[in-house]
């Protein structure tokens, strides 16, 4: 059997922030054949089970989690051949590393994911908030997902259109109804990547915005940019306790976009048609200094304007830091930030964990 069950496991060990109390029961699932056993086990505990990938985008409550926590550790990529429009279908297990998947398909000359290189976490987490970076989003390549539906108590298959994919959101985010099991993507064979829409990546390659280069070169440039911001696991030293982007890139009204552009902000057009500015630019504009303390055990990264945890950090302190940043950015820029991090576990009912 490839299902490991642990009671009272501190979830801080399973997240990149290193924050959080214990799980009443923690299950590491390595083979989908054992899923029925997990479903039976979960019936003995309150609440709907929570799925945890690599813990790279979660803040766990100091009180821990009384409902079962499932760590999807299933691995595997299967190339299913071409469909009528020439794209190649790729089936991936939910526990497979996203970074490894991107590396695999790029080396095969398949495009559609090259800008997602270096993003930590599992493939199963990507539709939950429609993971994206540098002009690409999962919504552009996702075909369908297979999931366990805790309401219907059976496996279901959902096409991409049914997943409700938007800017860093989907029907899965915050719902708790589904546990994603496998995903199918459609990627296109090409000697050149998608057009480069972000200046920072184009500058790294010394080409104009809109250029196309071999996908492996684009991926290397994106990876170099991410490393420079400390947003690749294992490269950021003292800033390693991070969730990457704590806040969404907020959507701007035309008036806000014009004003911030005049102030030097880089306004980017996202696949959903919205104009957005990076949260890190707003945090810097609000006067937060790199490395500066925000709350006990929580500070601004020394590499990038995002929040990181140090010794003594707690979930309560991290949510306090989120509130401080949201309020000062709103006061200084007129733009409201919204947390991107997922809040997992048993939170006090009176606490506003959404900042």
Image (cartoon, rainbow, N blue to C red):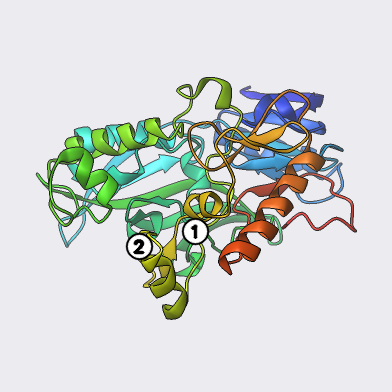
Along the line of sight, the residue nearer the viewer: 282 or 36? 282
Q: Nearest the camera: 31 or 25?
A: 25
Q: Secondary structure at mark 1?
A: loop
Residue at the spot of label 1: 249
Q: Is residue 260 above or below residue 305?
A: below
Q: Is any part of residue 290 visible from this angle?
A: yes
Question: In x, y percent, where is residue 44?
Answer: 86, 41
The Cα–Cα distance between marks 2 and 1, rounded to whole angstroms, is 10 Å
Residue found at x 87% / y 38%: 63
Kindly identify which numbered label has been placed on residue 268.
2
Quarter of the image for residue 224 reads: top left
Left or right of 285 in this view: 298:
right
Measuring from the top left, give residue 207's x and y in whole percent: 12, 46
- Label 1: how many Cα within 10 Å (few below 14, some 14–19, many 20+): many
Compare marks 2 and 1 and give the one earlier in the sequence. Answer: 1
Q: Secondary structure at mark 2?
A: strand
Position of residue 68 relative to residue 323, above or below, is above
Figure label count: 2
- Image coordinates for residue 125, horizontal then vertical, percent: 53, 46
Judged left or right of residue 12, residue 122 is left
Residue positioned 52% across, 56% down in the render: 282
Do the numbered discs 2 and 1 sit on residues whose CB atoms are within 8 Å? yes
| Mark 2 closeness class: few <14, some 14–19, many ≥20 residues within 10 Å | many
Q: Is residue 276 above or below residue 237?
A: below
């Amino acid at each position: 059997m490839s299902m490991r069950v642990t009671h009272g496991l501190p979830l801080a060990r399973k997240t990149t922030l290193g924050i959080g109390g214990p799980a009443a029961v923690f299950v590491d699932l390595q083979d989908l054949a054992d899923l029925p056993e997990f479903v039976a086990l979960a019936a003995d505990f309150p609440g709907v089970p929570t799925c945890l990938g690599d813990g790279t985008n979660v803040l766990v409550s100091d009180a821990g989690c009384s409902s079962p926590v499932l760590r999807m550790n299933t691995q595997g990529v299967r190339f299913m051949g071409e469909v009528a429009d020439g794209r190649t279908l790729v089936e991936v297990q939910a526990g497979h590393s996203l970074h490894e998947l991107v590396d695999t398909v790029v080396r095969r000359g398949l495009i559609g994911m090259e800008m997602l290189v270096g993003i930590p976490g599992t493939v199963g987490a990507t539709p939950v908030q429609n993971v994206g970076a540098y002009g690409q989003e999962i919504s552009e390549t996702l075909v369908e997902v297979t999931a366990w539906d805790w309401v219907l108590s059976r496996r279901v298959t959902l096409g991409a259109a049914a997943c409700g994919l938007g800017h860093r959101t989907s029907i899965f985010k915050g719902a708790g109804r589904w546990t994603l099991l496998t995903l199918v993507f459609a990627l296109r064979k090409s000697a050149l990547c998608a057009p480069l829409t972000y200046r920072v990546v184009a500058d790294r390659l010394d080409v104009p915005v809109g250029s196309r280069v071999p996908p492996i070169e684009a991926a290397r440039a994106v990876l170099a940019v991410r490393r420079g911001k400390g947003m690749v696991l294992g490269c950021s030293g003292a800033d390693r306790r991070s969730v990457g982007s704590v806040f969404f890139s907020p959507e701007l009204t035309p008036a806000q976009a014009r004003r911030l552009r005049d102030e030097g902000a880089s306004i980017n057009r996202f696949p959903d048609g919205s104009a957005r500015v990076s949260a890190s630019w707003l945090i810097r504009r609000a006067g937060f200094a790199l490395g500066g303390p925000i709350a006990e055990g929580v500070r601004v990264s020394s590499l990038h304007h995002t929040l990181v945890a140090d010794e003594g950090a707690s979930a309560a302190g991290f949510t306090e830091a989120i509130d401080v940043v949201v309020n000062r950015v709103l006061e200084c820029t007129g733009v409201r930030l919204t947390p991107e991090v997922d809040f997992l576990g048993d939170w006090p009912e009176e606490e506003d964990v959404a900042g």
